[in-house]
Amino acid sequence: MEKERILSGMRPTGRLHLGNYLGALSNWVKLQDRYECFFMIADWHTLTDRTDTKGLKQDIKDVLIDWLCAGLNPEKSTLFVQSHVPEHAELHLLLSMITPIPWLERCPTYKEKLEMGQENNYGLLGYPVLQAADILIYKANKVPVGEDQVAHLELSREIARRFNHLYDHVFPEPAPLLSETVKILGLDGKKKMGKSYDNYISLSEEPRIIEEKTQGMFTDPKKIYLGDPGHPQECNVYSYHQIFGKFLGENLEQIFKDCKEGALACTTCKKNLAHLLINYLAPFRQKRKELEKESLDKILNKGKEIASRLATSTLREVKKAMQML
Ligand code: TRP
């Protein structure tokens, strides 16, 4: 039986952090054996809110390196950069002709970005149309996405339906693949981990920085001195121990008890966490050092070749259905 096809993408935000890994990437790694996978670095999408393109090349490379460190395997999956396959842009143009503007205006991410004061440019409004082109050009059946992307995917499905109805049945309707992922809050314990909030630990973070960042973490405000009883169930540092403790075989019950009884000082608890994270991330740092010396062009060229073949063939079908060949 043929494997179902998956496409997903990430914008090139540079080095990835624990939130990216636990929320998406670690899941992608698992999907590689069950599906035919296409993973894309969405560099065009990043231009919707980034005019300064200095450093973009390095950011793309950094994402790719972190993907490889996490276990994405170019022998199993097609890893490529969006702009290396210009067919996406042509399909985006054609799909834009059948996408009513109100569909785009009611998109929650679009509204949020405007509220945040972002420039209301044409590309930003069309973001989901480009995303639809990314997915549909590979006739992907499934798209692993986080909850914040579900509305975008719904739009891709609507655009696919509209095209199929108006012209010919070319596109399967892509379904979201919502997997069980571990949710990790940022170091501030308030927002989700994100680069723009400066509350993250990257996969390649240096041990010294991990120590600094964890020492700065917010703990239970009711616990100030050693001896004060803590409330681990409300403490972000404890939630990190819950996520990563398994890794070094920590005795979580003991930590819980010691914190509650006041036997464990927050600074010690945070030092232990730093130790845990340094160990957890050691293989990433090691692998990154090796990969940084290599040229990764071979991987991206291979990805481009495989992706282009499929994209070109779908685009032909599209144009044929539209009587444009
Ligand atoms: N919009 C996605 C994000 O910001 C990235 C993306 C671009 C994507 N094209 C895609 C994700 C296609 C899934 C499928 O995370």
Image: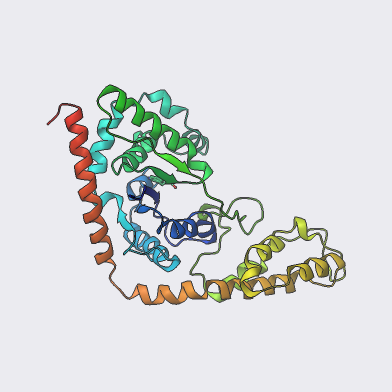
Lateral position of residue 212 relative to residue 7, left or right: right
In the picture, residue 164 is in which quadrant? top left
Q: Nearer the viewer, residue 7 or 66?
A: 7
Lateral position of residue 125 relative to residue 222, left or right: left
Question: Looking at this rendering, what residue extends furthest in the left direction?
Answer: 325
Question: Which quadrant holds the C terminus?
Answer: top left
Q: Is residue 49 visible?
A: no
In the picture, residue 248 is in which quadrant? bottom right
Question: Looking at this rendering, what residue extends furthest in the front direction?
Answer: 1
> Residue 236, percent across and down?
70, 59
* Colour approach in the figure: rainbow
Lateral position of residue 169 relative to residue 265, left or right: left
Q: Is residue 323 visible?
A: yes
Report the label total. Answer: 0
The residue sitting at 41% across, 29% down in the picture is: 104
> Residue 147, percent across and down?
53, 43
Q: Nearer the viewer, residue 27 or 278?
A: 27
Q: Nearer the viewer, residue 265 or 212?
A: 265
Give above or below for 157 relative to 242. above
> Residue 1, percent across and down?
34, 50
The residue sitting at 66% across, 74% down in the picture is: 249
In the picture, residue 123 is in which quadrant? top left
Give above or below for 259 relative to 318. below
Give above or below for 302 relative to 286. above
> Residue 48, percent across and down?
38, 42
Give above or below for 220 relative to 289. above
